[in-house]
Image (spheres, rainbow, N blue to C red):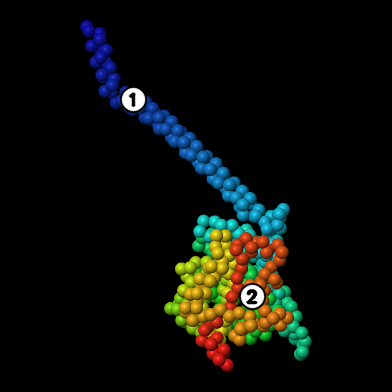
Amino acid sequence: VDFAMVIDVVLILLLLSPSTANGFSAVLRRCQARKKSDDERSKISMNHNRRTAKLLKRRDYVAASVFSVVSLSWPQPSVAGETFTGMLDACNQGELVAEQAVPGAYEQSCMQLNQRTVPIRIVKPSQDSGGKPGLESKELILQQQGIGAGNTGLSVWNSSLLLVRLLQALQAQNPAYFSNLRSVVELGCGPGLASLCLSYMGASKVMATDGNPNVVRLARDNFLQQQIPPPGEITANELSWGVMDAIEYSETADLVIGSDLTYNAGSWRLLAEAMETVLKRNGSVLYVTLGHAGFNVNAELQGFLAVAEELGMAQVNPGDPTWPFPNDQSSDTPPSLTNLILRECLSPRELPIVQATGGVRAVVLQKKRYIASMRMK
């Protein structure tokens, strides 16, 4: 007998039997399951390592962001040694704060707050017959919603603060002018600070406008949230610059106000068209512009004034027959509005901030045909 052949036959029969096949299959499944388990553990370990790396990266990013906010945005005080708390107090006292350039825009520390408080002092007529008018203090609460490119209208800018201070200085000289205003339009209103101020000064109707619907909603919300509602009618409406959009409000405004609107030369003509369209025949435009690093504020304003003159408007100065505000009787040469800002609207702490931006300019515009008619009288 060939024992080798017998052994081969037995092995073949064993391999062909169902129980043996099932046994081999079970062993094979266990081996495959063990390999799969090892692969899954390896995969889980790799995923864990990747998640850990992401978390560490995110941690580093957050830490860097926090450090950037604390060390770059806040610690650029206008006074050496100023603290974080001091900067926060400055923001909520309506002070000017130094700004920094960011990609596509500028920003300042106060813009990182969700809310700013701006105190104002306005002249209120006396309740007694023949009595002297008195000063009334108010705090305007303004919500903000972001900084950076595309969000420029959602925060309070230094130029808006200067416009409000100029309005207060002019009202102190002639309270009746502002209380007799029947209609005011603000172009590029932002959170609505200047419009609120004029409404509290007694203007019958104030319309804040902006081309960005998000800005209009923000201004409207700010009007509604004031602890003491403004006495007159105040609204926020969407209005893009140019004749076609502004024609709906043709010759409706006794006074048009705006601040920091001329930084883009491409919008000069549309802005001038909007001003000329909404302004009444005998109305005035009060405009304030504050420079930014890298901008020449004088060249910027002169370029806009040249465009505005082409469209039928001209600058007027103190002493001109159509000057809408009172002249300083104590001087043979009344100060310009720019000098009034520098003299009465800036603290010693804020003056270097304005100088660092290239300065501030304030002008009054009127329609040429109105100026000509008044000079003929």
The percent coordinates of residue 187 (x first, y second) are: 54, 74
Horizontal placement of 267 versus 228: left or right?
left
Amino acid type assigned to the residue bearing label 2 in the image: Leu
- Above or below: residue 104 compared with residue 334: above
Q: Nearer the viewer, residue 89 or 81?
A: 81
Looking at the image, which residue is at 37% across and 30% down? 32
Q: Nearer the viewer, residue 362 or 176?
A: 362
* Sequence-wise first label, 2 or 1: 1
Amino acid type assigned to the residue bearing label 1 in the image: Phe
Distance of label 2 from label 1 (alpha carbons)? 99 Å
Q: Is residue 190 visible?
A: no
Front position among marks 2 and 1: 2
Looking at the image, which residue is at 61% across and 79% down? 317
* Quarter holding residue 362: bottom right
As drawn, the label of residue 337 is 2
The N terminus lies in quadrant: top left
Q: Residues within 10 Å of mark 2 (few under 14, many from 20)?
A: many
Q: Which residue is mark 1?
A: 24
As drawn, the label of residue 261 is none
- Above or below: residue 89 compared with residue 15: below
Q: Residue furthest left?
A: 1
Looking at the image, which residue is at 68% across and 64% down? 351
Q: Residue furthest bottom?
A: 377
- Above or below: residue 228 compared with residue 79: below
The percent coordinates of residue 144 (x first, y second) are: 59, 64
The C terminus lies in quadrant: bottom right
Q: What secondary structure is found at the residue carrying circle 2?
A: helix
Q: Is residue 296 visible?
A: yes
- Above or below: residue 367 compared with residue 358: below
* Quarter holding residue 146: bottom right
Q: Residue furthest top?
A: 1
